[in-house]
Amino acid sequence: MAQANTALITGASSGIGEALARIHAGKGGDLVLVARSRNKLETLQAELESQQGVKVTVIVADLSDPDAANEIFSRTEALGIVIDTLINNAGFGGHGLFHERELVAEQQMMQVNMVSLTKLTHLYLQGMVARQSGRILNVSSTASFMPGPLQAVYYASKAYVTSFTQAIAEEVAEYHVTATALCPGAVDTGFVKAGNLQGLDVWKNAKTAESVAEYGYRAMQSGQLVAINEKGLDLMLNWIVPLLPRKLVLKLSRQVMEKKVKPVEAKITS
Protein backbone atom coordinates (compact mmCIF):
# COMPACT_ATOMS: atom_id res chain seq x y z
CA MET A 1 0.00 0.00 0.00
CA ALA A 2 1.28 3.48 -0.91
CA GLN A 3 2.49 5.65 1.91
CA ALA A 4 -0.03 8.25 3.07
CA ASN A 5 0.74 11.77 1.88
CA THR A 6 -1.93 14.26 2.86
CA ALA A 7 -1.21 17.96 2.38
CA LEU A 8 -3.07 20.82 4.02
CA ILE A 9 -2.91 23.97 1.90
CA THR A 10 -4.17 27.38 3.00
CA GLY A 11 -5.23 29.95 0.43
CA ALA A 12 -6.03 27.01 -1.84
CA SER A 13 -8.88 28.58 -3.82
CA SER A 14 -6.67 30.41 -6.34
CA GLY A 15 -3.15 31.40 -7.38
CA ILE A 16 -0.14 29.58 -5.96
CA GLY A 17 -2.26 27.63 -3.47
CA GLU A 18 -4.53 26.20 -6.15
CA ALA A 19 -1.52 25.36 -8.33
CA LEU A 20 0.15 23.56 -5.42
CA ALA A 21 -3.04 21.57 -4.83
CA ARG A 22 -3.06 20.43 -8.45
CA ILE A 23 0.60 19.40 -8.26
CA HIS A 24 0.13 17.42 -5.06
CA ALA A 25 -3.01 15.69 -6.34
CA GLY A 26 -1.20 14.89 -9.59
CA LYS A 27 1.32 12.95 -7.54
CA GLY A 28 -1.43 10.94 -5.86
CA GLY A 29 -1.56 12.88 -2.61
CA ASP A 30 -4.75 13.57 -0.66
CA LEU A 31 -5.59 17.14 0.28
CA VAL A 32 -7.17 19.39 2.86
CA LEU A 33 -8.01 22.65 1.12
CA VAL A 34 -8.49 25.78 3.23
CA ALA A 35 -9.76 29.19 2.11
CA ARG A 36 -12.72 31.53 2.56
CA SER A 37 -14.45 30.74 -0.74
CA ARG A 38 -16.54 27.59 -0.39
CA ASN A 39 -17.67 27.56 -4.02
CA LYS A 40 -14.13 27.72 -5.41
CA LEU A 41 -12.88 25.07 -3.00
CA GLU A 42 -15.72 22.68 -3.75
CA THR A 43 -15.26 23.13 -7.50
CA LEU A 44 -11.58 22.29 -7.15
CA GLN A 45 -12.42 19.40 -4.83
CA ALA A 46 -14.78 17.84 -7.38
CA GLU A 47 -12.26 18.24 -10.18
CA LEU A 48 -9.32 16.72 -8.31
CA GLU A 49 -11.30 13.82 -6.88
CA SER A 50 -12.73 13.01 -10.29
CA GLN A 51 -9.59 13.44 -12.38
CA GLN A 52 -6.87 12.35 -9.92
CA GLY A 53 -8.73 9.86 -7.75
CA VAL A 54 -7.57 11.46 -4.51
CA LYS A 55 -9.47 12.33 -1.33
CA VAL A 56 -10.04 16.06 -0.90
CA THR A 57 -11.46 17.66 2.25
CA VAL A 58 -12.67 21.27 2.20
CA ILE A 59 -12.44 23.54 5.24
CA VAL A 60 -13.85 27.04 4.90
CA ALA A 61 -11.98 29.41 7.20
CA ASP A 62 -10.90 33.04 7.43
CA LEU A 63 -7.34 33.13 8.71
CA SER A 64 -7.75 36.74 9.86
CA ASP A 65 -9.89 35.24 12.64
CA PRO A 66 -7.66 34.53 15.67
CA ASP A 67 -9.49 31.24 16.28
CA ALA A 68 -9.24 29.95 12.71
CA ALA A 69 -6.05 27.91 13.12
CA ASN A 70 -7.39 26.07 16.17
CA GLU A 71 -10.67 25.37 14.38
CA ILE A 72 -8.86 23.97 11.32
CA PHE A 73 -6.72 21.72 13.51
CA SER A 74 -9.73 20.53 15.51
CA ARG A 75 -11.56 19.69 12.29
CA THR A 76 -8.76 17.56 10.88
CA GLU A 77 -8.30 15.84 14.24
CA ALA A 78 -12.03 15.05 14.44
CA LEU A 79 -11.91 13.58 10.94
CA GLY A 80 -8.84 11.51 11.79
CA ILE A 81 -6.78 13.16 9.03
CA VAL A 82 -3.01 13.00 9.53
CA ILE A 83 -1.28 15.98 7.89
CA ASP A 84 2.01 14.87 6.36
CA THR A 85 2.64 18.13 4.49
CA LEU A 86 1.66 21.61 5.69
CA ILE A 87 1.67 24.40 3.10
CA ASN A 88 1.04 27.84 4.59
CA ASN A 89 0.23 29.81 1.45
CA ALA A 90 -2.52 32.24 2.46
CA GLY A 91 -1.46 35.86 2.71
CA PHE A 92 -2.16 39.36 1.48
CA GLY A 93 -0.56 42.77 1.19
CA GLY A 94 -1.47 46.41 0.83
CA HIS A 95 -0.03 49.61 -0.59
CA GLY A 96 0.38 53.05 0.96
CA LEU A 97 2.03 55.08 3.67
CA PHE A 98 1.78 53.23 6.98
CA HIS A 99 0.43 56.22 8.93
CA GLU A 100 -2.33 56.75 6.34
CA ARG A 101 -3.52 53.15 6.13
CA GLU A 102 -6.26 51.75 8.34
CA LEU A 103 -4.68 49.99 11.30
CA VAL A 104 -7.27 47.23 11.20
CA ALA A 105 -6.09 46.25 7.70
CA GLU A 106 -2.51 46.02 8.92
CA GLN A 107 -3.55 43.97 11.95
CA GLN A 108 -5.48 41.56 9.74
CA MET A 109 -2.42 41.25 7.51
CA MET A 110 -0.24 40.40 10.50
CA GLN A 111 -2.81 37.86 11.69
CA VAL A 112 -2.96 36.05 8.34
CA ASN A 113 0.67 36.35 7.25
CA MET A 114 2.29 35.64 10.61
CA VAL A 115 0.07 34.63 13.52
CA SER A 116 -2.20 32.07 11.85
CA LEU A 117 0.80 30.66 9.96
CA THR A 118 2.67 30.26 13.25
CA LYS A 119 -0.29 28.64 15.00
CA LEU A 120 -0.87 26.12 12.21
CA THR A 121 2.82 25.28 12.14
CA HIS A 122 2.90 24.73 15.90
CA LEU A 123 -0.22 22.59 15.90
CA TYR A 124 0.79 20.28 13.04
CA LEU A 125 4.53 20.22 13.68
CA GLN A 126 4.10 18.35 16.94
CA GLY A 127 2.59 15.37 15.13
CA MET A 128 5.30 15.44 12.48
CA VAL A 129 8.02 15.38 15.13
CA ALA A 130 6.30 12.50 16.94
CA ARG A 131 6.08 10.54 13.66
CA GLN A 132 9.60 11.68 12.67
CA SER A 133 8.31 12.57 9.23
CA GLY A 134 6.84 15.65 7.60
CA ARG A 135 7.32 18.63 5.34
CA ILE A 136 6.40 22.28 5.76
CA LEU A 137 6.32 24.86 2.98
CA ASN A 138 5.79 28.47 4.03
CA VAL A 139 5.14 30.81 1.13
CA SER A 140 7.14 33.94 1.85
CA SER A 141 8.52 36.48 -0.65
CA THR A 142 11.65 38.15 -1.92
CA ALA A 143 10.19 41.09 0.02
CA SER A 144 11.45 39.32 3.14
CA PHE A 145 15.05 40.29 2.36
CA MET A 146 14.69 44.06 2.87
CA PRO A 147 12.43 46.71 4.42
CA GLY A 148 9.58 47.88 2.18
CA PRO A 149 8.51 51.51 2.29
CA LEU A 150 4.89 51.78 1.06
CA GLN A 151 4.39 48.12 2.05
CA ALA A 152 5.98 48.34 5.48
CA VAL A 153 3.90 45.72 7.29
CA TYR A 154 3.78 43.28 4.35
CA TYR A 155 7.56 43.25 3.91
CA ALA A 156 8.06 42.91 7.66
CA SER A 157 5.57 40.05 7.87
CA LYS A 158 7.41 38.15 5.15
CA ALA A 159 10.76 38.77 6.86
CA TYR A 160 9.22 37.02 9.86
CA VAL A 161 8.10 34.07 7.75
CA THR A 162 11.52 33.54 6.17
CA SER A 163 13.35 33.85 9.49
CA PHE A 164 10.86 31.67 11.39
CA THR A 165 10.96 28.94 8.75
CA GLN A 166 14.74 28.67 8.80
CA ALA A 167 14.84 28.55 12.58
CA ILE A 168 12.34 25.72 12.92
CA ALA A 169 14.02 23.85 10.05
CA GLU A 170 17.16 23.66 12.16
CA GLU A 171 15.22 22.64 15.26
CA VAL A 172 13.38 19.73 13.64
CA ALA A 173 16.04 18.42 11.24
CA GLU A 174 16.99 15.66 13.67
CA TYR A 175 13.39 14.38 13.52
CA HIS A 176 13.50 14.03 9.71
CA VAL A 177 11.10 16.96 9.27
CA THR A 178 11.90 19.73 6.80
CA ALA A 179 10.78 23.35 6.53
CA THR A 180 11.15 25.43 3.38
CA ALA A 181 10.55 29.14 2.77
CA LEU A 182 9.43 29.80 -0.80
CA CYS A 183 10.44 33.34 -1.70
CA PRO A 184 9.12 34.26 -5.15
CA GLY A 185 9.43 37.61 -6.84
CA ALA A 186 6.43 39.10 -8.65
CA VAL A 187 3.72 36.52 -9.36
CA ASP A 188 0.69 36.99 -11.60
CA THR A 189 -2.16 36.28 -9.16
CA GLY A 190 -5.10 38.06 -7.55
CA PHE A 191 -2.61 39.37 -4.97
CA VAL A 192 -1.90 42.39 -7.22
CA LYS A 193 -5.49 43.62 -7.39
CA ALA A 194 -6.23 42.80 -3.75
CA GLY A 195 -3.18 44.72 -2.55
CA ASN A 196 -3.80 47.71 -4.85
CA LEU A 197 -0.48 47.10 -6.61
CA GLN A 198 -1.60 47.64 -10.19
CA GLY A 199 0.53 49.89 -12.36
CA LEU A 200 3.88 49.07 -10.77
CA ASP A 201 6.65 48.15 -13.20
CA VAL A 202 7.67 45.19 -11.04
CA TRP A 203 4.58 43.28 -12.22
CA LYS A 204 5.35 43.57 -15.94
CA ASN A 205 7.51 40.43 -15.87
CA ALA A 206 5.55 38.56 -13.21
CA LYS A 207 5.91 34.78 -13.22
CA THR A 208 2.91 32.47 -13.42
CA ALA A 209 1.49 30.93 -10.27
CA GLU A 210 1.99 27.49 -11.83
CA SER A 211 5.72 27.98 -12.41
CA VAL A 212 6.24 29.29 -8.87
CA ALA A 213 4.24 26.42 -7.39
CA GLU A 214 6.28 23.86 -9.36
CA TYR A 215 9.52 25.43 -8.16
CA GLY A 216 8.35 25.61 -4.56
CA TYR A 217 7.02 22.06 -4.51
CA ARG A 218 10.32 20.67 -5.81
CA ALA A 219 12.24 22.74 -3.25
CA MET A 220 10.03 21.40 -0.46
CA GLN A 221 10.45 17.82 -1.62
CA SER A 222 14.23 18.18 -1.61
CA GLY A 223 14.26 19.84 1.81
CA GLN A 224 15.66 23.12 0.53
CA LEU A 225 15.85 25.83 3.19
CA VAL A 226 15.10 29.00 1.21
CA ALA A 227 13.88 28.84 -2.38
CA ILE A 228 14.04 31.90 -4.66
CA ASN A 229 12.55 31.09 -8.06
CA GLU A 230 14.58 33.62 -10.08
CA LYS A 231 18.37 33.34 -10.32
CA GLY A 232 18.79 37.07 -10.88
CA LEU A 233 16.87 37.91 -7.72
CA ASP A 234 18.78 35.25 -5.80
CA LEU A 235 22.07 36.85 -6.79
CA MET A 236 20.90 40.38 -6.06
CA LEU A 237 19.29 39.68 -2.69
CA ASN A 238 22.00 37.40 -1.29
CA TRP A 239 25.16 38.94 -2.71
CA ILE A 240 24.53 42.55 -3.77
CA VAL A 241 21.88 44.09 -1.52
CA PRO A 242 23.68 43.11 1.72
CA LEU A 243 26.72 45.13 0.58
CA LEU A 244 24.79 48.33 -0.15
CA PRO A 245 24.27 51.16 2.38
CA ARG A 246 20.99 50.72 4.23
CA LYS A 247 19.60 54.13 3.24
CA LEU A 248 20.29 53.38 -0.41
CA VAL A 249 18.47 50.06 -0.12
CA LEU A 250 15.48 51.86 1.41
CA LYS A 251 15.40 54.44 -1.39
CA LEU A 252 15.62 51.76 -4.08
CA SER A 253 12.97 49.67 -2.36
CA ARG A 254 10.62 52.64 -2.19
CA GLN A 255 11.19 53.54 -5.85
CA VAL A 256 10.03 50.08 -6.87
CA MET A 257 6.73 50.64 -5.00
CA GLU A 258 6.13 54.28 -6.01
CA LYS A 259 3.08 55.03 -8.13
CA LYS A 260 0.90 58.04 -8.85
CA VAL A 261 -2.45 56.47 -7.99
CA LYS A 262 -3.72 57.20 -4.48
CA PRO A 263 -3.74 53.94 -2.46
CA VAL A 264 -6.94 52.27 -1.28
CA GLU A 265 -7.41 49.60 1.34
CA ALA A 266 -6.46 46.02 0.54
CA LYS A 267 -8.90 43.13 0.78
CA ILE A 268 -7.88 39.72 2.07
CA THR A 269 -7.42 37.03 -0.56
CA SER A 270 -7.32 33.37 0.29
Image (tube, rainbow, N blue to C red):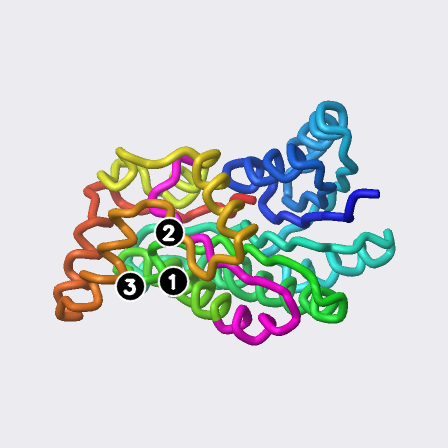
In the rendered structure, find residue 146 and report the number of the disc placed on it. 3
| Residue shown at the point (38%, 40%) measured from the top left | 187
Does 27 sit above or below residue 229?
above
Which residue lies under the disc numbered 1? 153
Does 40 sit above or below residue 197?
above
Element marked by disc 1 = helix
Give the residue type that dot 2 points to: Ile
Asked whether residue 179 is drawn in magenta, I would say yes
Indicate which disc, 1 or 2, sits on the residue closer to the N terminus. 1
Quarter occupied by the C terminus: top right
Give the residue type that dot 1 points to: Val
Which residue lies under the disc numbered 2? 228
Mark 1 vs mark 2, foreground winner is 2
Q: CA distance from mark 1 to mark 3?
A: 12 Å
Indicate which disc, 2 or 3, sits on the residue closer to the N terminus. 3
Q: Is residue 94 left or right of residue 3?
A: left
| Residue shown at the point (25%, 40%) measured from the top left | 200
Mark 1 vs mark 3, foreground winner is 3
Element marked by disc 2 = loop
| Segment colored magenta | 167-189
Q: CA distance from mark 1 to mark 2?
A: 21 Å
Q: Picture quarter containing residue 38?
A: top right
